[in-house]
Image (tube, rainbow, N blue to C red):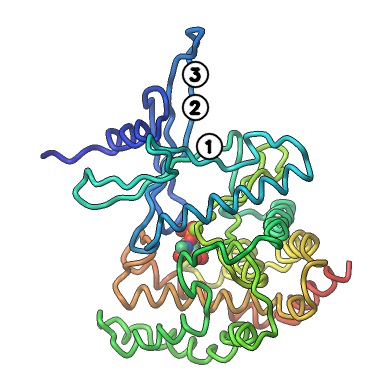
Amino acid sequence: MHPKTTRETLANICEQFRIPGELLWYKSIQSGNINTTYVVMMQDVDGKGKTIQTSYVVQKINSYVFHDPEGMMNNIDLVTEHIMKKKRQRFGIIGRRYRLHFHHTHEGKNYLYDLSSGTAEFWRVMNCIEDSVGFDESNDPKVLYTAGKAFGQFQVNLSDFDAEQLVETIPNFHNTRLRLEAFFADVERDECNRCCEVRDEIAAIKELFPTACKLTDMLASGELPLRVTHNDTKSNNVLLDKSTLEPLVVIDLDTVMPGLAMHDFGDAVRFAANSAAEDEADLSKVSLDLDLYRAFAEGFIGATAKHLTQVEIDTMALGAVTITIELATRFLNDYITGDKYFKISYPKHNLIRARCQLALVKDMLSKFEDMDRIVKETAAG
Ligand code: GN1
Ligand code: MG
């Protein structure tokens, strides 16, 4: 049996999701370290004989990472429905560009198990938000402010959502203590014999361990409240209008789960306020840009402040440090265990990512007083 081309596969998936027309072209989307994403352009003829072209996002879920895709899609349905209700209450009718819509198969499901390749593959199809842009990086404070506002509003919209309804799509996803403990256990095993080349990085993570555990421990002791959070607040997960930069919709809801407010703040800052890319190899370029940090804080804290406790505000800056240590650990853990989790573009990619995150933590710690002050000033209005 000859293997199906990507084009044939995508056309078949679209057919199974009842998408009308023929596949005109497709392109692969490179951003995202876990799932495989394509945009497809479908061409159809309407009732009056006019040709219409519509684009869709087709995604193959990484089932090494997500073990309960059905539970995940159910979470997404519940969360998007709740958010739409909130948006309708505020703005009335909501246009297509402000909502995520998942298409349904002939069986009425918003996901598809495809067994035709011999291994189970899990697919979903959603609308493409026209004339939108998601920024992998930007030096424009307005973009950071807008992203902060959108993620903050997202959290506020979910503040009355019953978290009991959600499955944990990845258990202990941001349990930093467990992440670091799992890493040290993998260092002991050293299954790929790679630990000898990363002794300095392992030592750095050991030194950061007490700092990394603070938030997890405060959650366990009840000092910090559990909320429903996004948990993957990279700036490219907010789509903005290409020309006006108005926020349209928050995407990538795979890890919406109970979590900590300052993890959403911190992960966004880790990614978007870094003066370099997440995988910059030249560490002299890596630093926390305090202007971008302030812009994000003004957006995020502005939207959430009145819903947060004082302890949450007091630990917001620590959220950025914590999640950056966590990512450094996750990248390095993947490197020493054979690069099974994150997609890599070259052999030492995960190691380079880990080093970049460690450099960023170091810079954050040297600017910590400013980071904390900026949050508090913003919260005070
Ligand atoms: C992964 O695939 P993407 O880019 O949405 C990861 C995040 C990391 C991020 C680092 C489910 O997100 O936790 O912060 O890479 N997602 C998962 O770039 O592990
Ligand atoms: Mg993601």
At label 2, counting other C-alpha atoms closer than 10 Å, the crowd grade (few under 14, some 14-19, many 20 or more) is some
Q: Earlier in the sequence, mark 2 or mark 1?
A: 2
Front-most of 42 and 192? 42
Give the vertical position of 47 relative to 212 (above or below): above
At label 1, counting other C-alpha atoms closer than 10 Å, the crowd grade (few under 14, some 14-19, many 20 or more) is many
> Do residues under tags 2 and 1 come within 8 Å of each other at their CB atoms?
yes
Q: Amino acid at mark 3?
A: Ile
- Can you identify the residue that label 2 sits on? 54
- Tell me the quadrant of the picture where the C terminus can be found: bottom right
Q: Secondary structure at mark 3?
A: strand
x, y (%) of residue 89?
Answer: 77, 45
The disc placed on residue 128 is 1
Q: Secondary structure at mark 2?
A: strand
- Can you identify the residue that label 3 sits on? 52
Q: Amino acid at mark 2?
A: Thr
Calculate the distance from the C-alpha at mark 2 to the C-alpha at mark 3.
7 Å
x, y (%) of residue 28?
Answer: 39, 42
